[in-house]
Amino acid sequence: MAGLGFAAPVDWQTILGAKANSTDTEGYPGPYYVVYNASGGWDTTYLMDPKGVDGINRLYQQGEILTVGNHRLAPIAKHIANGMSNEDFFAKYGSELRVFNGLDLSVNNHTPCARYMATGKLDSLAYPTFPALVAACYGAEAPLAFLTFGNYSATGNLVPMSRVPYLQSLRLLARADSVEGGTHPYQDAFASDRIERALEEQFQARVSDSRLPRVERSQSMLYAAQANSKALQRVIPFLPKEQAKERLSQQNDIALAAFKAGVCISANLSIGQFDSHNNNDADQMKLIPEFLAGIDDLLTKAEALEIRDKLVVIIQSEMGRTPNYNNGNGKDHWSIGSIMFLGPGIAGNRVIGATDEKQQLLPIHPQTLKIDSVDGIRVRPEHIHQALRELARIEDHPLSQRFPLQVPAQEKLQGFWG
Amino acid sequence: MGSQTQQTASHCPTRLPWLPWIVSMILIADIGNPVIGQSPPEPSDATTLTPSKNSLEFENEVWAKVVERTCIRCHHMQGDAKDSELVLETSIDGLYDPETLVRNEKAMRSVARKSFGEQSIVLQKSIGRLDHGGGQILKPDSTGYRILERFVEQTLLPTKDPKPDEAMESDQQPLFFDGITMLSETRLLRRITLSLLGRLPTPEESKAVEQDGLAALNPIMDSILREDAFYVRLKEGFNDIFLTIGIEDNAETLLSYDHFEKTRLWYQTHDFSHLPESERQRAGWKLAAVYRDALLREPLELIAYIVRNEKPFSELATADYIMVSPYTARGYGIFDEIKDQFQNSEDPFEYIPARLHALKGRDGKVQESKTGWYPHAGFLSMFHYLRRYPSTETNRNRLRARMFYQHFLGIDIMQLAPRSSDAAAVAAKYEIPTMQAPDCVVCHKTIDPVAGIFQDFNFQGELGPRKDGWYQDMFPAGFEAEVLPDEERWRASQWLAERTIKDPRFPIAMAEHVYFILVGRKVLQPPEDIEDSNFVPKRKAFLEQRKMIREVATRLKESNFNLKEAFKAIVVTEFYRADATSRTIEQPHRQAELEDVGLVRLITPEQLDRKIQAIFGKPWGRFQEEYKILYGGIDSITVTERNADPSGAMGAIQRIMANDVACLNVGLDFHRPTAERRLFPHIEPTVIPGDETSDINIRETIIALHLKILGLDLPMDHPEVDRVFDLFSGIVREAKALPSFEPRETYFCGGREDFRVDDPHYTVRAWRAVVTYLLRQHAFLYE
């Protein structure tokens, strides 16, 4: 159910204010934030937190666990048919990759876990997801400031969410004043200009009207949405000619074109079906490689577009899976998870946190980030989100402060990205 | 003092306070330890039911910020702390009348006076001391604790006067809608007909409200709620809630292979011999598609049938029938039995109520039934509903139970999930955590019994009990502490339905559904952040809305659940009619109070298409498929919530729509004989600005267009009329200044090959710009 905060439209003052102050006609220059969601709950023991003991994994034993630099990874290459193996993924990106194991989700149901992972707040429906927050802080005026392709996508009323499922749609939107996105304009240029000017005059004239707060905000929102949408034409040069076949590649293409055009700050990308209550190993061996291949696709294409060094990538799932198999050869929900990061400002080849051989988390000391069973803390999503806000340099932004994470100063993770 | 074992055994509330019950993580609160209670005499005013001087502070501070959020979760008549000295009166919807609040204040003050050592036990218990069964509720340095401290101090020194500003506040409470102007009756009528019917008001309807005001609305609503178009909107609205058309598989799979093997694929053997060979395959595909569509519609048709016939909406849960069409009846194998009841037995979308016989499996075994019929219980036994919310071996129908609470009782269990100190350790520690671990029991004790109600349905929602019987490591099937008797097992869904519709939360949940359909957003939740300087005004807004919802729910219940009454009640509320403020609101508290006031809803793609049809005579069409998701619509499967705010992508679609609809209709309208025009019946393309007569003609047309497209009745000298006049005349003037321009209107927007419109003065194109401008207006795109 929507909270009181949900009832209000998004923060139009931010959007308009940003628009008014924006002089950069080329749009938002980065960094761009991408959150990949393995929706349904991935099996971390088949990825970055391998076990191979006590029947936790049927596909390998402890002695088969691989290492790439400081990373330990589950050997899966021989169990997959398509996609990218852990072996290849870590070989290619391990030096840039930062892994956190032993994240305490506190609950084990999809909805609250997804909300918690996305926002850093378990018990509120009003908080924005990290990509929504960072979009609001850096460029709410961008027409596709916060793109989402699924998963929990609350915005905290800070920025509108954009759903653009197909490339072709983006092409049409980019040429809204031309018939069918073609070369014939609907209106002559001088008529179009007069329409836009009349709308702007009307908007300015309304400032002194006595309007209800909802009316005032929604009128401003509407004006901003229409006015800012013109910047969508910048995506056209970056749209691939063909729509990709793979699920994540389709999402990547849209997000990358929007990033490159400077019309997007963040994207929430997702594939589902990780909820492997039945036949865990078969499902995870299909989905993890698909997921990793999707991330590889993004980074490879970003390289070609010359924005690779501006991409902050967060790789997560709303929960882990139990250390034991159920009667259906599946694994159920587990409230201990992992998360991975790469991008500018994030030192790679590092693993923080750990779980024990029963897949229980080991507390870490927030200052040293080392395992510390005496003075350590249970790292939860709010700690990670606090670190993410610091990475994005928005921790003191007024919009962030409207949604405090309430992490005690002594629990803030020191040097988490270094 | 409750031991851990005792706490677990009696942990979850049965009759639950409306809001926080399901999220309670508080263990038994055993405030009433006779050893430690030491009470000074109570002052006499505490025994009366007159609000004390400090009552306002009690309600807005102590009650709203502390007690309602914490203590009452356990300390009520059915709660875990029901045997303690602090027992509070609860509410199912967050509303408390003043007398109840006074009694609760008295109860709180009573325990506040008890001390152990030198401090009130209520303060000590709240921070987890004195073996408080609920553990630590407040941190000693928290705002909540400080409020409680002040309350105790005030209780022990009852002569202390409230702060001057508090007393003043109590005397100066404005009415909630003070200073808010309401929509005129004619605009309200337009809002209603466009929202519910997708049409403009008829002249008769307009005349009636002009003459009789709101009094005319009730009979008009009666008429509106009988129109077929209303049922399109009704079904669309309820699908937004139940999402029952969101079935991924072919719809005939809703009918189980085990019970409908011989009938569910009837279309595959349909006789197409009368068609040429080359057309038969395509005809077969079409038949299958129509059949599947007809099946998917059944749940929503049940809703339409109940409402259209003014049957009790409680039949949503209790209907002992389903709705079938001639096509779907064939799938169930009952067509021959009931075909005479159809007016047209070949109409795939004519629905009538029907009952299924007790289902017979392929092994010949017939479903247990003491009536011989399938035990229908509205949505609760419909294959569609059960499939839409499937189960798994580990989920064990808990999703179904969750959706039951959300859809039928208005409780979202997953809204605020209880946090465990270490969920993984809890899961590992207990053999059956959901029955033994207090952190888990708190919810599962409520959820699992309802999950058990659906035990005879398999993961896909087909009748198919588990071979090994229902799980023994779950709380037994039942509802709210009442266990399902064995003899009722065969009709478990009906048993649940009978209890559901008697639950006081049921009419409230239904009223909230209607509110959602009309307003496009869910009801307010109470504010969460007690540190928020706007906490009190936000809570006031919440409570005002709760009052409205309660009134609607009461009217609904008193009408024997005639859902039309809920629609009629809400459209005349101030919440639905609020339009503007009579003066600029500058006080932040007042702004916070009014934050959610006013309909102000971005209309859905479906509604927008109907609105375009109502105004221009035909829908745009592209909102139904191409732009549906892009424009914030839903597919009922993966995209299930509509966008409330326009993104830049949606702004682009608005521009495309405005351009295209204006292009499609303006030239066409001028092409029509004057008497047949919808937009320009009183002006010709030859009228150009410059002389008084022409200018008046143009201005009158602008006013008429505002009325037609936006529903705004503007005076001739309104600034907006000036602005649009300037837009029109400026374009004509600018065109005239060009060396040359095409003397005919461009027609690239499609469908216009059969005619072209001469436009030697550029006026047709200027009017197109005017219409484009109007179609991009807030008044057009929002309700």
Image (spheres, helix red, strand yellow):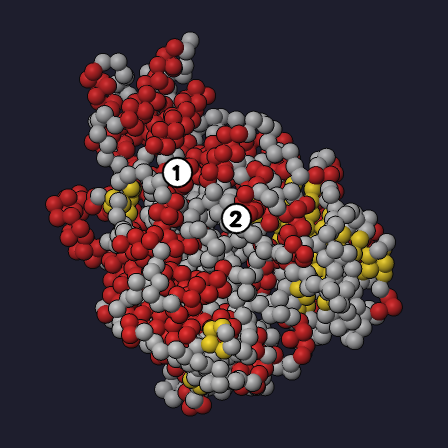
* Structural crowding at the residue carrying mark 2, measured as other residues with C-alpha within 10 Å and reported as few (<14), some (14–19) or many (≥20): few
Q: Nearer the viewer, residue A400 or B763?
A: A400
Badge 1 is on which residue?
A: A219
Residue that lies at the very extreme toward the bottom in this rendered image: B487
- Where does the image place residue B1, in percent across and percent down from the top left? 52, 85
**Above or below B629: residue B81:** below
Badge 2 is on which residue?
A: A402
Q: Secondary structure at mark 1?
A: helix
Tell me the kind of residue under disc 2: Arg
**Above or below B568: residue A252:** above
Chain of the residue under label 2: A
Chain of the residue under label 1: A
Q: Residue at x 43, y 84 (%)?
A: B83
Left or right: B581 in relation to A388: left
* Structural crowding at the residue carrying mark 1, measured as other residues with C-alpha within 10 Å and reported as few (<14), some (14–19) or many (≥20): many
Q: Nearer the viewer, residue A59 or B279?
A: A59
